[in-house]
């Protein structure tokens, strides 16, 4: 009888001095440092060297999602809030007070008119279903709270307007991650966005892509490296803490993704020809591995959304254009089917993203590399430095 050994979340912890958490982007995108982990070797370098580390036969895959200015400030009507004491002169102001909304996911059923969104609302306890929220003068946007969920989540229905996303761009703020301890600025509108961002829908940037510039992309093309894009809209679950002690008990979040016909053909051809697929960022890794039917540890997750999307051909995955919801959880023990090398930023202790990287390169090697990065004063997280991981 096989003995099943659980993976503990505590095994992915490391000490990170708070001052190493990058609060601002570097002066230049490509000026970031890069830790190169290849097999057992570890080397300090700079991202500007990345094009020369690629092979001319590689297929480099990006996530072309675009970050929405998904943080909104407004006020509520107050007619569904729990009443306060009439003796309290601040009651009326409180019931109609300022609220903050973070749109986390556009829901099925949304169309060009009515918009349905999952969102976090603060303060949340007094805001009940039926409450109306107003944003901007006029107001420019008006939403009704439909349902109430856990951890401050709400389902919002925005009243139809002809130019919802244009108004969102006008009113919204860039939703910086919680470990960036400052308000967003005009600079973040550009720098918390990749230069190849195309499809709007994320509430967080695919941060490994933030290092690229048009000049770096041109150097990559000049080396003959083929490129392709997938779309995965990054959700708030990226920052959600693991609340269980055992990794297998954690339920991974879902994120909408899409693979075009052109990208599907490029990935299929690269795997058939024995060429490397290099993923830019963990979001790209999750998209490719989920679409290839990655079983990981959860048999339910091994099933593709549509059985015709992928089939085996001489042991290699064959892709077809499709879209869906990716919910694959990658941690040590997972067998990678598509990705042969990856570029990624440094991730939070005990996070699902650190577990994904550990699944690729080995927990001990990754944690040793993180200890090295701390000693060498690398910058961590979204606006921080990066790692390039490749097997021998």
Image: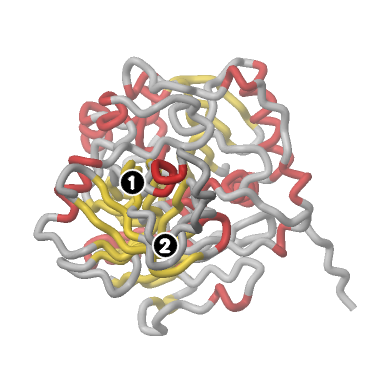
Colour logic: secondary structure
Name the spot of residue 174 as percent of width and height, x first: 33, 37
Q: Residue furthest bottom?
A: 307
Q: Is residue 62 above or below residue 257?
A: above
On the question of residue 133 being in view, the answer is: yes
Counting residues from the start of the chain, the first of labels 1 and 2 encountered is: 1
On the question of residue 57 being in view, the answer is: no
Q: Residue furthest left?
A: 162
For marks 1 and 2, give the one nearer the viewer: 2
Q: Is residue 373 left or right of residue 253?
A: right
Q: Is residue 137 left or right of residue 340?
A: left
SS for dot 2: loop
What residue is at 61 percent from the left and 15 percent from the top?
376
What residue is at 18 percent from the left and 40 percent from the top?
170
Identify the image quadrant of the C terminus. top right
Q: Is residue 102 above or below residue 317?
A: above
Name the spot of residue 119 as percent of width and height, x first: 41, 56
Residue closer to the observer: 163 or 391: 163
Q: What's the distance in space between the residues labelled 1 and 2, CA to CA?
A: 13 Å
Name the spot of residue 351 as percent of width and height, x first: 62, 46
Q: Is residue 281 above or below residue 21?
A: below
Identify the image quadrant of the N terminus. bottom right
The residue to which callout 2 is attached is 80
SS for dot 1: strand
What residue is at 57 percent from the left and 37 percent from the top?
347
The residue to which callout 1 is attached is 75
């Amino acid at each position: 009888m096989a003995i099943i050994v659980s993976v503990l979340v505590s095994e992915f912890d490391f000490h990170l001095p708070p001052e190493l958490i990058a609060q601002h982007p570097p002066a230049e995108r490509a000026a970031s440092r890069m830790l190169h982990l290849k097999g057992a070797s570890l080397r300090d370098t700079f991202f500007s060297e990345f094009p020369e580390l690629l092979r001319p036969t590689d297929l480099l895959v990006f996530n072309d999602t675009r970050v929405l200015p998904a943080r909104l400030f407004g006020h509520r009507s107050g007619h569904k809030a729990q009443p306060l004491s009439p003796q309290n002169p601040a009651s009326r102001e409180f019931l109609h007070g300022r609220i903050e909304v973070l749109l986390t996911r556009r829901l099925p059923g949304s169309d060009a008119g009515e918009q349905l969104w999952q969102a976090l609302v603060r303060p949340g306890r007094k805001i009940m279903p039926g409450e109306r929220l107003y944003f901007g003068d006029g107001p420019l946007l008006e939403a009704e709270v439909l349902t109430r969920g856990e951890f401050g989540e709400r389902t919002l229905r925005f009243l139809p307007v002809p130019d919802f996303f244009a108004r969102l761009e006008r009113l919204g703020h860039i939703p910086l991650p919680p470990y960036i301890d400052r308000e967003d600025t005009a600079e973040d509108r550009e720098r918390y966005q990749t230069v190849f961002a195309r499809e709007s829908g994320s509430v967080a940037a695919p941060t490994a892509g933030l290092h690229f510039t048009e000049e770096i992309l041109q150097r990559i093309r000049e080396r003959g490296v083929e490129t392709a894009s997938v779309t995965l809209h990054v959700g708030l679950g990226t920052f959600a803490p693991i609340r269980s002690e055992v990794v297998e008990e954690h339920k991974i979040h879902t994120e909408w993704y899409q693979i075009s016909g052109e990208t599907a053909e490029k990935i299929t051809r690269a795997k058939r020809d024995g060429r490397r697929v290099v993923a830019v960022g963990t979001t790209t890794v999750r998209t490719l591995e989920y679409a290839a039917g990655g079983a990981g540890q959860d048999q339910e997750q091994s099933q593709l959304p549509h059985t015709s999307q992928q089939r085996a051909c001489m042991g290699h995955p064959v892709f077809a254009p499709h879209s869906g919801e990716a919910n694959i959880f990658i941690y040590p023990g997972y067998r990678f089917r598509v990705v042969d090398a990856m570029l990624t930023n440094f991730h939070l202790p005990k996070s699902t993203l650190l577990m994904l990287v550990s699944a690729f390169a080995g927990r001990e090697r990754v944690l040793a590399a993180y200890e090295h990065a701390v000693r060498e004063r690398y910058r961590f997280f979204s606006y921080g430095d990066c790692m390039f991981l490749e097997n021998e």
